[in-house]
Image: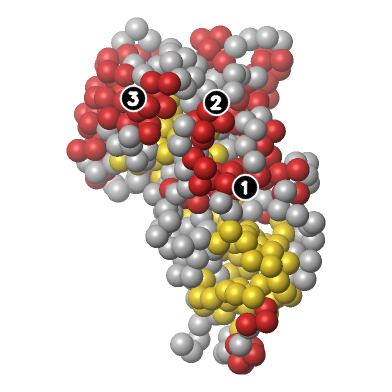
Amino acid sequence: MNNINRLLIVNIKLLNGICDAEVRLKSGKGMEQWETLENAYLLTEGSSISAFGKMESLDPSLYELEGLKVIDATGRMVFPSFCDSHTHLVYAGSREIEYVDKIRGLSYEEIAKRGGGILNSAKRLHDATEEELVEQALQRLNEIITYGTGAVEIKSGYGLNTEDELKMLRVIHRLKMLSPLTIKSTFLGAHAVPAEYKGKQDEYVELIINEMIPQVAAANLADYIDVFCDRGFFTPDDTERILMAGIKYGLRPKIHANELDYSGGIQVGVKYNALSVDHLEFTGDEEIAALLDSETMPVLLPGAAFFLNMVHAPARKMIEAGLPIALASDFNPGSSPSGNMQLILSMGSIMFRMTPQESLNACTLNGAYAMGISDQYGSITVGKKANFFISKPISTVEFMPYAYGSNKVETAVLNGEVVHNA
């Protein structure tokens, strides 16, 4: 056990998000279960959590451990790091001019038809170098660490041709090596139909299936495959064909679905055992029934609904039906330009009427499930990765979503290492 970095957090006012190792997600009424421990300690060894308990049970000999660093958390709480399972944070430049168009009443679809939206980001990405993209994305990753995020999924989808999609995925691969964050990569060639394929959508689908997917898989650049299955984008038939091709190459599906209408995307996702189906503003009884019989995580993206002033997903109905829910940021330049998961936590309570405990589970353990990593992340569990944050002095758990305008994170620990101190 020599030469191992050890971290001992003592006098923790409240240790949050404690969970048994076999629990990989929380659903329905179980989303209210948020186990805590007052006046606690937490010990990490290497990159993992090795022990925790009440301060009165702390063995004094722990202080003699070699390589030990001690942090006194008096008045502070410890939470498992947020797991943000849906982002597009590799992009070139912002799109605030479209933001003004939205203020003036143009819809998401109207902006897209004018060459804005995803196609605008695709042009900017094409003109940017990989170095520029890495530099911009690292700044965003460093920022979200300060807000408490410890794991993040990043999608391609601003390339929309083989060369640029591969460029995006290479950038994400480099970020995995450069950042202390745990990063999962998703291939989203089917994010929009490029302008040159207008009226020839089938040809673009064929390009994704016959050229993009084989090259992405050959270079081992993606963990998952995604399709924007919605009105005005890709049909359920398109989606099925793309997912089947991805599955053949070992890429499990994650789907954008039902953001703009009842698209059939949720049912397609369930049919192909998608790890998650995301957005879900339009979710009715049929969609809920399909999800109840599945291992697919419903992921809600309140930042996008807020920014676009869209109808809210029926979170309460979904939870009361027995479903699990994850919350993610959808961090992207067009419809959710923020990766602040503390804000998403608050939106879960404010917009979706989720209790603070439900929102916390949705942002941690269930988010980890939606990334395929809840065996190692998303809760305070002996043996899991030491990914957690120490709050500033706060009064209650409920203060986390309540104080939506301030950063409550004081210290961030990833893989057992302190990576941020306010």
**Label 1: which secondary element:** helix
What residue does disc 1 label? Answer: 357
Residue at (79% x, 61% y) in the render: 393
Q: Earlier in the sequence, mark 1 or mark 2?
A: 2
What residue does disc 3 label? Answer: 267
Quarter the C terminus occupies: bottom right
Kindly report the distance in space between the C-alpha atoms of the residues bearing marks 1 and 3. Answer: 29 Å
Q: Is residue 156 left or right of residue 396?
A: left
Residue 287 in picture, x, y percent from top left: 40, 24
| Count of numbered tags | 3
Kindly report the distance in space between the C-alpha atoms of the residues bearing marks 2 and 3. Answer: 17 Å
Q: Is residue 259 above or below residue 326?
A: above
- 229 and 76: which one is in front? 76
The local crowd at label 3, few if under 14, some if 14 to 19, many if 20 or more residues have their Cα within 10 Å, is many
Q: Is residue 271 above or below residue 134?
A: above
Whether residues under marks 1 and 2 lie with C-beta atoms below 8 angstroms apart, the answer is: no
Whether residues under marks 2 and 3 lie with C-beta atoms below 8 angstroms apart, the answer is: no
What residue does disc 2 label? Answer: 314
Residue at (34% x, 7% y) in the render: 199
Q: Quadrant of residue 352?
A: top right
Kindly report the distance in space between the C-alpha atoms of the residues bearing marks 1 and 2. Answer: 18 Å
Whether residues under marks 1 and 3 lie with C-beta atoms below 8 angstroms apart, the answer is: no
Residue 258 in picture, x, y percent from top left: 45, 21
* Label drawn at residue 286: none
> Given the image, on which type of amino acid does mark 2 rest?
Pro
